[in-house]
Image (tube, rainbow, N blue to C red):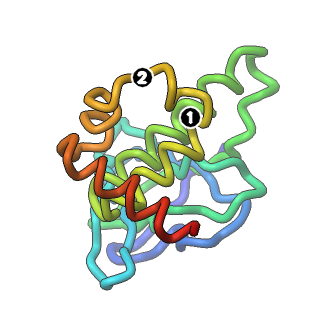
Amino acid sequence: MKEYSIKKGQLLQQKGDLNSKAYQVISGLLRGYTIDEKGKENIFMFAPEGWFIGDSVPANIPADLYIETLENSVVISSTKDLSKHSPNVNALVRRLEVLQKRVIMLMSATALERYDHFVETYPNLMQRVSQRHIASYLGITPEALSKAKGDRLRSNS
């Protein structure tokens, strides 16, 4: 692996990039963020010295995050294919992907978008988890969940 010096303000990754990399920060500071439909930036995480940063989506899926240097930085980049390191790593990578999407959704999505994402991510849990727990997971009130479900039913009619 090789160290790279990168000037402040450089984008290492843009939303939509394929085969994004993970970065270990030797010195400096990076941030990962999204930009929602209204143009608002939502910072997902900071990565100071000693931290790693990368998009958790699989290599063949378009990246969700922008990754930018906030200071002149030295990083080591690597591919994100960890499956060769451990047979159980795919489950961990999938969990990180779900967590990243969840945090981004909580920062920028509407209640209906959060609900749709929950149904897509956990299609078999609707009958197994109470509405109160689903609402809590989505960061909304049970009343907002009822409204989102009603809105979804009306839009599918």
In the image, is 99 to the left or to the right of 132? Answer: right
Q: Nearer the viewer, mark 2 or mark 1?
A: 2
Taking the spot 35% from the left edge, 47% from the top edge, the residue there is: 103
Using the image, determine if residue 89 lies above or below residue 59: above
Q: Nearer the viewer, residue 106 or 71?
A: 106
Residue 142 position in % (x across, y down)? 22, 41
Q: Which of 18 and 133 is in front in this view?
A: 133
Do the CB atoms of the residues marked 2 and 1 lie less than 8 Å apart?
A: yes
Q: From the viewer's side, name the closer residue of 10 and 90.
A: 90
Residue 20 image label = none
Q: Is residue 111 above or below residue 146?
A: below
Residue 5 visible (yes or no): no
Residue for badge 2: 129
Question: x, y percentage for residue 96?
Answer: 52, 35
Q: What residue type is labelled 1?
A: Tyr
Q: Residue at x 59, y 46 (%)?
A: 120
Residue located 39% across and 64% down the image = 151
Q: Residue at x 35, y 77 (%)?
A: 9
Q: What's the CA distance linking mark 2 and mark 1?
A: 10 Å
Say which quadrant the C terminus sits in.
bottom right
Question: 10 Å neighbourhood of mark 2: few (<14), some, or many (≥20)?
Answer: few
Q: In this view, does 115 lie to the left or right of 4?
A: left
Farthest residue, direction bottom: 39
Q: Residue 25 at what x, y percent from top left? A: 41, 46
Residue tagged 1:
122
Q: Give the answer, above or below, for where 149 lies relative to 83.
A: below
Q: Dot 2 lies on which element?
A: loop
Q: Which amino acid does label 2 sit on?
A: Val
